[in-house]
Amino acid sequence: MKLKGVKSTFLSLGGVACLLALLIYFQAQWQGQLPLISYLVYPLLVITAVFSAQFNRSRVAILCAFWVIFLTAKSYPEFSSNSLMDDAQWLLLCGASLLMLLAIIKDRDLLSVHSISRLIFIILCGVMTFAWLKLSQNFEFLLPQTDFWLKLLPYIAVTIPLVFIGLLLTWRSLSQNNLTLTALLITLIVWCLNQLNIVALPWSVIAVVLSSFYLFAVSTDSYYLAYRDDLTSLPTRRALNQLALSLGRRYTVAMLDIDHFKKFNDTYGHDIGDQVLKLVAAKMTGVSGGGKIYRYGGEEFTIVFPRKTVEQAIPELDNLRQSIANYDMVIRNPKRTDKSARNTKKNNDYKTVNVTVSIGVAQRTSKQSFDQALKSADLALYRAKKKGRNNVSQ
């Protein structure tokens, strides 16, 4: 399985780690502003929660609500004394369990039919953590009296669950390019470090740092959804329009279309059609010459070569066309419908097919707008289709 979130996870971890290190190093400089920070943290958490809920990032909103409750309980002794807030182990493990829950569930509308079930699961995190810690007091009598179990016994109650939760959140963050999951992992690390007094920073400062990262994560993910195609992960036409505003006077535009895509889709099904789109998109990301790739819509793609002439762009486009045409795509035979046929492995169960693309390319001329240059490339694409497809036309 491809790990899609490695880059975002390590960059985020590095950024937060550097920020925390600077806060610790220059602690004397901001220590006098701590009362002001304590007053600002609540508005920041509320703003982050509202912003997250607006973009259907309910998990971040729940996380902000957790910080508000936790900071309130810490700030007012009447809430925290003689309660579970005094139990360091329960607090540590309960917070980690909540983060694990948020890593497993999906983002949904904050006020929906799922709200009650989520509230129940959150309460269960606290109840089950309490029950687990009570049970762990009797592990000495329940487990075999061997050297292995006696050595493991001190770590069963808290350390092993934390390691398991940490590995789960790490895997979720690395396997998906989702900053919400990265935010949960960072929160777990900071939560554990501060609870164990390894990082000695006031909780209000920790909450300000993390809520700022939550705002960044939600903003970045929302931008990604707005400007990236969900199927191919390529920038969309909206991103193409943004690029058009920053282009200089010299550039070349290419329009690419998958040949006979509708017929292919009707023959093999939409799932295979989606695989073809992803294949072509993946091949296009390897185009050289500084080409920027966008999904224009349907089976059409756009490539922009800033500061390049059409003579410079055509060889790159022809190499791309050949790499797509020469790729053998293995698909399942769509005619197998009965159960006995599905359980029988035959050579004709799979079929190797090839897809081709037609490309039209045009260089911007004097006083021509981007839309006009795009239209010229579209007309060149039409000529490529008329020539018999699977070619590059100017």
Image: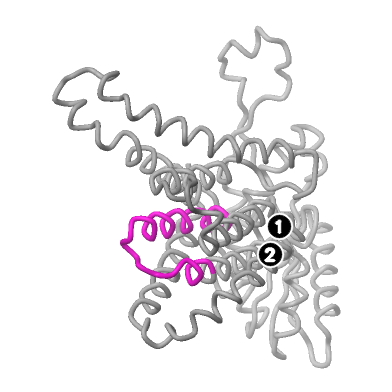
- The mark found on residue 229 in the picture is 1
Residue 363, horizontal then vertical, whole percent: 74, 81
Q: Are marks 1 and 2 in contact (CB under 8 Å)?
A: yes
> Is residue 2 visible to us here?
no
Magenta region? 178-207
Residue corresponding to mark 2: 235
Q: Nearer the viewer, residue 359 or 107?
A: 107
Residue 39, horizontal then vertical, whole percent: 60, 76
Q: How is the image coloured?
A: one colour
The residue at the point 77 percent across, 53 percent down is: 299
- The mark found on residue 124 in the picture is none
The residue at the point 36 percent across, 85 percent down is: 28
Q: Quadrant of residue 355?
A: top right
Residue 294 lies, with reference to residue 65, above or below; the image says: below
Q: Mark 1 to mark 2: distance in Å?
A: 6 Å
Q: Amino acid at mark 1?
A: Asp
Residue 366, horizontal then vertical, whole percent: 80, 92
> Is residue 87 visible to us here?
yes
179 is within the stretch colored magenta: yes
Characterize the magenta stretch by its predominant secondary structure: helix
Instruction: Give the side of residue 304 with respect to residue 67, left or right.
Output: right
Q: Nearer the viewer, residue 327 or 111?
A: 111
Residue 176, horizontal then vertical, whole percent: 54, 50
